[in-house]
Image: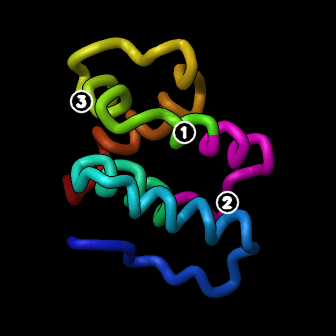
């Protein structure tokens, strides 16, 4: 897979923006981790979840990737329930 499999049709502007940002990180590894998560869950996330996702994606890829890959614990700035949901999704994703 090389990009989103989800159409942004029917999403509100906030979700469209987050979907785009998750797939356009700057590093391919993070595009795949965050983009696949967004494809699968963006439509069902609550407003609080969206706020937490926005906070997570503000982190720089060199800080996020090692935490998602298991090489280091997440930094306090983005540790939390959303980080754990993304990490669990990454582990269970059938298209790693």
At 26% across and 51% down in the image, what residue appears? 27
Q: Nearer the viewer, mark 2 or mark 1?
A: 1
Mark 3, mark 2: which one is toward the viewer? Answer: 3
Q: With respect to residue 68, does 90 lie above or below?
A: below
Q: Quadrant of residue 42?
A: bottom right
Q: Residue at x 50, y 31 (%)?
A: 83
User: Residue at the spot x=60%, y=43% of the render?
Assistant: 53
Name the chief secondary structure element in magenta: helix
Task: Tell me which numbered mark, 2 or 1, is placed earlier along the sequence.
Answer: 2
| Badge number at residue 26 | none
User: Which numbered dot is residue 58?
Assistant: 1
In contact (CB < 8 Å): disc 3 and disc 1: no
Residue 17 point in image, percent of width and height:
62, 66
Q: Is residue 76 left or right of residue 52?
A: left
Q: Does 70 sit above or below residue 26? A: above
Tell me how far mark 3 sits from mark 2, CA to CA. Answer: 25 Å
Confirm whether the magenta stretch covers residue 69: no
Which residue sits furthest right?
A: 47
Marks 2/1 in contact by CB < 8 Å: the verdict is: no
Q: Quadrant of residue 86?
A: top left
* 12 lies above or below 76: below
Q: Secondary structure at mark 1?
A: loop
The region drawn magenta spans: 41-54
> Mark 3 or 2 closer to N-term?
2
Question: Which is more foreground, mark 3 or mark 1?
Answer: 1
Label 3 Cα crowd, 10 Å radius (few <14 / some 14-19 / many 20+): some
Q: Which mark is residue 44?
A: 2
Front residue of this view, candidates 74 and 92? 74
List the residue tagged with mark 3.
69
């Amino acid at each position: 897979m090389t990009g989103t499999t989800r159409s942004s049709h029917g999403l509100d502007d906030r979700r469209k923006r987050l979907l785009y940002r998750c797939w356009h990180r700057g590093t391919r590894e993070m595009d795949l981790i965050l983009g696949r998560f967004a494809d699968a869950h963006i439509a069902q996330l609550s407003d609080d979840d969206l706020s937490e996702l926005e906070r997570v994606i503000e982190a720089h890829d060199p800080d996020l990737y090692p935490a998602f890959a298991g090489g280091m614990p997440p930094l306090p700035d983005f540790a939390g329930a959303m980080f754990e949901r993304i990490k669990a999704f990454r582990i269970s994703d059938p298209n790693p």
